[in-house]
Image (cartoon, grey):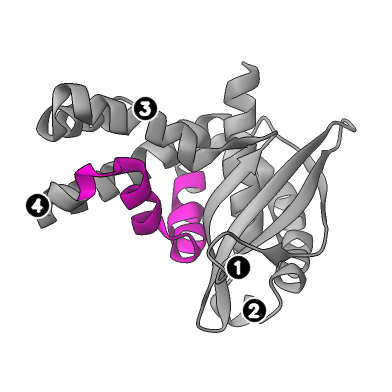
Amino acid sequence: MMKILLNALVLTVSFVWMSVAAATIAEKDPVLQAKKVADQLIGRIDQERKQLEKDTNRVNQLANELVFPYVDVTKMARFVMGASWRSASAEQQQNFIDLFKKILLNSYARSFLKLQIDRVEFAASRPGASGKDVEIPATVVEKSGNAVPFIFRLFPAGDTWKIYDVEIQGVSLLLNYRSVYANDIDQKGLPAVLEQMRVQANAL
């Protein structure tokens, strides 16, 4: 249960981070962007909670409309596949991206409404490993008083920023998924893993 809630918290915070129109979050300062978005979206989620509880498909709709345009799913998928990405066909790559996105969304949307975030406190950004990306340490404070440390990893994309990884309590979302999928691909082969993902995505 704790793992499910932590995973849901990852998606929720990503939702809070990026779920507004591009025109309202265009910021060269990633921390300032984060603060603006968090303030707006925590209020919006609370306002729409009753509607979301009645129709969980609405969570999927909001995420597809407002979250994923600001999350680099392709970059995430390439990392998760590891060395197999280079040997995969263009069709296999696209299938993996689409299925990975659907699994992420469907898995976390179920637990989405269990979380009630009071605020997100951001520290100053710092250079990332590549020198082009940035890391932003943050603390997510739930209304219960529970505080969870996060690290957002982003890179610049025009006049905004895109998430490519989230670390929660020392565990990287990307590394966690890579340890599962890359290992499965090595053992079973990519076609088998894609079929496995397709079944999983449709079952959620």
Q: Position of residue 29 (x, y in %)?
A: 71, 77
Q: Label 4 to label 1, Cα distance in Å?
A: 34 Å
Task: Tell me the element at label 1.
Answer: loop
Task: Tell me the element at label 2.
Answer: helix
Nearer-N-terminus badge (1/3): 1
At label 1, the amino acid type is Val
Image position of 68 with respect to 196: above or below: below
* Of labels 3 and 2, the one closer to you: 3
Q: Position of residue 55 (x, y in %)?
A: 51, 39
The residue at the point 29 percent across, 27 percent down is 183
Q: Position of residue 68 (x, y in %)?
A: 45, 58
Task: Tell me the element at label 4.
Answer: loop
How many numbered discs sit on the rendered protein?
4
Please state if 60 lies on the left or on the right of 98 as rendered.
Answer: right
Please state if 100 lies on the left or on the right of 123 as rendered.
Answer: left
- Which residue is labeled 2 in the image? 24
Nearer-N-terminus badge (4/1): 1
Within 10 angstroms of label 2, few (less than 14), some, or many (20 or more) residues? Answer: few
- Quarter of the picture containing the N terminus is top right
Q: Which residues are magenta?
A: 59-85
Q: Which mark is residue 89?
A: 4
Please state if 172 lies on the left or on the right of 85 as rendered.
Answer: right
- Which residue is labeled 3 in the image? 180
Mark 3 vs 2: CB contact within 8 A: no
Nearer-N-terminus badge (3/4): 4
